[in-house]
């Protein structure tokens, strides 16, 4: 049950969390623990077996949305650290808010973590697994005089809570007798009261400079269907209360959170220490450690804002390739390897900073450059007529699938009298430094022949509709004499008679600014109206008709593309551009 999960690589670089874990192991901080497991687990019933995992971490998303690229950093860290030290990482859903959680989100989260390359084995848990235990512990807090039922309205509670510079004031219900609190709590559980009538609060310190310790709410009434427990419960525990107890019940050693939870750590420790004093939890207790969350330019990573983008129709769903969700990046054409490389490259820090999106893009280029097959694609086509090529004659030119990987084999490019080239590969009056087609100039058609431009055709508006050329004898690539032609320009092309016409989507950033929503700005007013350009019938080399969903290619000179995993059909792929060959600063991929 507790074998380390295989195949999960920890970040190679050292970081402060790795140092903490190494120190804890050296001093035997968690030596001699017993594996308790979740309530109802056979191991928990046995209760005496030593815990086989030296280190236990957890990834604990709330199932109220899809995971985004910031979660990917946490996934890589938690699973990576556990694997690096022969431990286990738990996959746990903190499903304590039935009004916002859905099975769809659970399924999407599990799929995203697996796609990133991580497995949890038997360690799949839900906070709802612990509802009975959490409630029993809540009664213990009441019985020890450390929790009370408060009947104030939310507005009244906020008024008494105080500010960062002023202490809070006690609720008039703070000194309710223990017996009355227990009676009210049990009636809350029995469903006697409507939503909002009462809450259960811990009794800590209303004058604490840390607002999280000013008698935090740990239970509220919610008459709502829960996706796992149905209508069995009508009171639900709050996240801060649930999270630390779930960690303790699962023998988590290192609870790794982002920095916004730093102020919550005293409450985390207070709850666990009290429960240990009550004899309800065994020591050693888990510890929480915070690291900097991922902030990425040109995207929003607020779950609230992502939900707005989806529900208000600014994007085509959670998996829209412009979304910074893991499923969005996947559909865009990103690879698990590139995202794990990105997580390793940016490292783990103690202070927040903003990372350039170009670093993520460069990780993808680095990954795909090494393994993506090459292909020809003409996105803005202009007809090229080879006047001295026989009508109806077709020659098959051979090209490598990848220039550095002969094991990937070759591909066949049919060559005929009429071809498609990119419109910007021709200039009737070329600017200085233009080495492509213009009257009188020689260029090589890649993997085929050298041709000489002889002129062009235009329509009534003066727009060029076709370019004419003649093929140079003995200029076929790879044949004797071909090197006699010294040309400065090489063009990609596809045969007009054989080209595959397929939709191609060219994506740009969803936002026009580096930090959407910064200050008082409405992030929705900063959406990029040109974030996607759909070419309904780009012209591609014919072999791409066999592209499988999620198969990635480098379209030479255009970037890295993927066959869309949703819209592609057998023989009819739809391609998304994942990333260009160069970033906005002109750095080559």
Image (cartoon, helix red, strand yellow):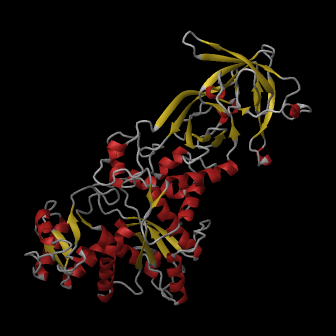
Residue 586 x %, y %: 59, 47
Q: Is residue 243 above or below residue 73?
A: below
Seen from the viewer's position, the closer of residues 514 and 576 is 514
Who is closer to the viewer here, 453 or 280?
453
Which residue of the protein is positioned furthest toward the front in this rendering? 432
What count of labels does the image hold?
0
Identify the residue at horizontal 14%, vertical 60% (top origin): 194
Compared with 512, 470 (above or below) is above
Say which quarter of the image contains residue 415: top right
Residue 236, picture quadrant: bottom left
Residue that appears at 62% across and 65% down = 7
Residue in the foreground of this view, choosing between 17 and 268: 17
Decide: is 30 above or below 561: below
Judging depth in this view, the residue of 520 and 180 nearest the camera is: 520
Res 263 quadrant in image:
bottom left
Looking at the image, the residue that sits furthest to the left is: 172
Q: Position of residue 418 (x, y in %)?
A: 72, 19
Q: Is residue 131 left or right of residue 325?
A: left
Q: Is residue 193 visible?
A: yes
Q: Residue at x 69, y 29 (%)?
A: 542
Determine whether, in the image, residue 467 is placed left or right of residue 168.
right
Horizontally, residue 407 falls left or right of residue 19, namely right
Quarter holding the N terminus is: bottom right
- How far across and down, in percent of the image, does residue 392 sit? 78, 15
* Residue 192 visible to the viewer: no
Residue extending furthest right? 480
Q: Residue at x 64, y 53 (%)?
A: 367
Give how far across and how far down residue 385 sits, in percent: 72, 17
């Amino acid at each position: 049950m507790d074998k380390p999960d295989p195949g999960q690589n920890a970040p190679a670089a050292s970081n402060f969390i790795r140092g903490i874990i190494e120190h804890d192991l050296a001093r035997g901080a968690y030596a001699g623990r017993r594996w308790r497991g979740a309530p109802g687990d056979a191991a928990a019933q046995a209760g005496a077996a030593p815990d086989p995992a030296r280190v236990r971490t957890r990834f604990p998303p709330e199932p109220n949305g899809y995971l985004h690229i910031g979660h990917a950093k946490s996934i890589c860290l938690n699973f990576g650290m556990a694997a690096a030290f022969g431990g286990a990482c738990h996959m746990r859903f903190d499903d304590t808010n039935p009004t916002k959680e859905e099975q769809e989100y659970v399924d999407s989260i599990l799929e995203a973590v697996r796609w990133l390359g991580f497995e949890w084995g038997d360690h799949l848990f839900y906070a709802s697994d612990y509802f009975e235990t959490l409630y029993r512990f809540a009664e213990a807090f009441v019985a020890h005089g450390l929790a009370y039922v408060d009947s104030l309205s939310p507005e009244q509670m906020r008024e008494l809570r105080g500010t960062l510079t002023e202490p809070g004031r006690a609720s008039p219900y703070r000194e309710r007798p223990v017996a009355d609190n227990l009676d009210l709590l049990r009636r809350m559980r029995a469903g006697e009261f409507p939503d909002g009538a009462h809450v259960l609060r811990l009794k800590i310190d209303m004058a604490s400079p840390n607002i999280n310790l000013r008698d935090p709410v740990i239970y509220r009434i919610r008459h709502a269907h829960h996706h796992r427990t149905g209508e069995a419960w009508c009171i639900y525990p709050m996240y801060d209360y649930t999270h630390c107890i779930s960690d303790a019940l699962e023998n988590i050693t290192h609870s790794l959170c982002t920095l916004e939870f730093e102020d919550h750590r005293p409450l985390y420790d207070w709850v666990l220490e009290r429960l240990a004093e009550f004899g309800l939890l065994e020591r050693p207790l888990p510890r929480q450690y915070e690291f900097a969350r991922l902030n990425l330019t040109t995207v929003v990573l607020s779950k609230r804002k992502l939900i707005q983008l989806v529900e208000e129709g600014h994007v085509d769903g959670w998996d829209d390739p412009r979304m910074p969700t893991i499923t969005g990046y996947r559909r865009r054409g990103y690879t698990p390897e590139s995202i794990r490389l990105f997580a390793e490259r940016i490292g783990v820090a103690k202070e927040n900073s903003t990372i350039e999106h170009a670093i993520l893009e460069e990780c993808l280029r680095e990954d795909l450059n090494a393994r993506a097959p090459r292909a020809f694609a003409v996105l803005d086509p202009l007809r090229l007529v080879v006047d001295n090529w026989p009508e109806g004659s077709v020659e098959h030119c051979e090209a490598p699938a990848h220039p550095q990987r002969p094991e990937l084999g070759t591909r066949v490019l049919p060559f005929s009298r009429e071809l498609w080239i990119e419109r910007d590969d021709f200039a009737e009056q070329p600017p200085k430094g233009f080495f492509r087609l213009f009257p009188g100039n020689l260029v090589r058609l890649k993997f085929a022949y050298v041709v000489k431009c002889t002129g062009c055709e235009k329509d009534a508006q003066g727009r060029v509709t076709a370019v004419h050329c003649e093929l140079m004898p003995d200029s076929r690539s790879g044949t004797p004499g071909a090197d006699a032609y010294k040309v400065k320009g090489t063009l990609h092309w596809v045969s007009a008679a054989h080209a595959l016409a397929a939709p191609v989507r060219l994506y740009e950033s969803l936002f026009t600014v580096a930090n959407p929503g910064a200050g008082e700005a409405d992030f929705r007013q900063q959406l990029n109206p040109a974030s996607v350009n759909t070419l309904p019938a780009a012209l591609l080399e014919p072999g791409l008709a066999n592209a499988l969903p999620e198969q990635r290619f480098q379209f030479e000179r255009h970037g890295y593309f993927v066959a869309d995993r949703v819209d592609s059909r057998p023989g009819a792929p739809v391609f998304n551009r994942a990333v260009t060959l160069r970033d906005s600063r002109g750095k080559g991929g």
